[in-house]
Amino acid sequence: MLTVTDLSVAYGPIKAVNGISFEIPRGAIVTLIGGNGAGKTTTLQTISGLVRPAAGVIRFNQEDITRLAPHEIVARGLCHVPEGRLVFANLSVAENLALGAYLQRDSASIDRTREHVFALFPRLKERLKQTAGTLSGGEQQMLAIGRALMGWPTFLMLDEPSLGIAPRLVTTIFEKIVEINREEGLTILLVEQNAHLALEISSHAYVLETGQIAVAGASRDLRDDPRLKAAYLGG
Amino acid sequence: MSEFLQQLINGLSLGAIYALLALGYTMVYGVLRFINFAHADVFMVGSFAGYYAARHAPAGTLWGGLAVLAAAMAACAVLGVLIERFAYRPLRHAPKLNVLIAAIGLSLLLEYGVQLLFGATPRNFPQVFPSARLQFGPLTVSSNQLVVIVVSLGLLGGLQWIVFRTRLGAAMRAVSLNPRAAQLVGINLNTVVAFTFALGSALAGAGGVLYAMNYPSIDPFMGVMPGLKAFVAAILGGIGSLPGAALGALILGGAETLVGGSAYSTYKDAIAFGLLIVIMLLRPAGLLGRLTVEKV
């Protein structure tokens, strides 16, 4: 569904991503793991059009989307839930969700999607009028995912959904990610520092190290890979 | 007392013009986080556009006046969009200092460009709206002042409606809160920025005509002082805040007129910049602005 070929991204003289290629089949959960500064976030930002690549091709449903603007990519059903969640802090939960449906015109189906998001995250319904900035980190993450779902994506990219969130909520959020994948058939690209969790729910994994893919394979195999154990899974 | 009320009305009409200008500064700052120093010259171009449009409209009639106003607004909206497209968009990812330098250069370009095309001699702005003096007890209100206040209120109301009730308005607010997140929900950043420039410049164009009606001598450098004052008003109210810009402008217009009508009238212009210093010391975020804290 998403094919990335020889992607390189540079910030001035610094190469953040250096010739990576990977493929994500429809309906899968694939994870991109790696340490700080490995190039995970840059990769997602390049796919969603926020950052321009120096070289390489990104194809989504066979179409070359490498040079498209972010809003054109969202319109094709590829949604990015960014690191740090980036909810609209001064707006209410309801307004945030409404903005998520910015490209949708049919109010009946917007309402249906909203109900669906509430079913997934009942907490959001309870806090509908609350300002997003006053939500807890976990609730903000739910809102960020909910906001992305309001845009009817077929492909969801999640950047560090566990970052800065109470451990109990991390489990909830990961369960929901699996639920979104299984029940709605959304394809998911998950970027995580928490390699344990990411390998548990994904089918395939790519390990990024200093902008390059160091290890790739089925998540089940990587869980026992000695190289990964030493570096990311705490021995 | 009646003297005070009279000055208050004068201040209100001056403040209303500052508000129209200040909103442009604050809106552009809201979405792009820089001060468009060429904005004052868009205001000046608005006066000139009004001056030329007035030749083709029946003088001294309500409809003629409104047509002149609309023509100036349209001309400025187009100018604003062109400025953004060709001067600022290429610098979108450049350091803010480069953008600032471009803005100052653009300001000079507009001033001297208009001087080259139309000459430096001040021109008399025609009476585009019907002229009358209305007497409310001891208070005298010129119809021009009334037009300024009514038109400004109408435009502010219209802006409020656009920003809070329309899809593009919602997109503007989203971009000003977080441009990245806005793009990720499918908002076209370029459209929103162009729209913001069109809107702000149209208001400046209206301001140019209204200002010229009350101070009916226009020249290529007429925008400088009102532009600086409106900039101060935007800072005073809290840059990025629309109600703040309007409030700051009314305070500034009022204060300036009151001082202008007193024994210290020579210090009239010092008021604006004195206020700027005071607000910077006491409340750098402005009256209605808030220092945003990012949650981690």
Image: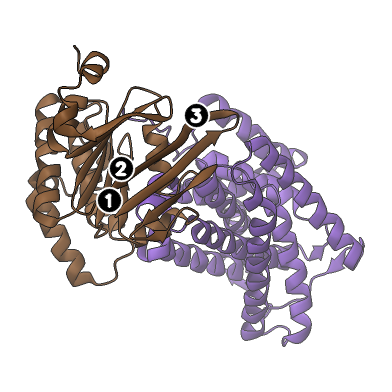
The mark found on residue A87 in the picture is 2
SS for tag 3? loop
Asked if labels 3 and 2 share a chain, the reply is no
SS for tag 2? loop
| Residue B170 locus on image (x, y percent) | 38, 58
Mark 1, residue position: A96
Does B176 appear above or below A116? above
Q: Within 10 angstroms of label 1, few (less than 14), some, or many (20 or more) residues?
A: many
- Going 9% across and 36% down the picture, which residue do you hit? A172
| Residue B160 locus on image (x, y percent) | 43, 61
How far is mark 1 from mark 2, CA to CA? 7 Å
Instruction: Chain letter for mark 3, please.
Output: B
Residue type at mark 3 is: Arg
Q: Within 10 angstroms of label 2, few (less than 14), some, or many (20 or more) residues?
A: many
Q: For chain A, what colour was chosen?
A: brown
How far is mark 3 from mark 1, CA to CA? 30 Å
Most foreground residue, B210 or B187 = B187
**Chain the render paints purple:** B
Mark 3, residue position: B283
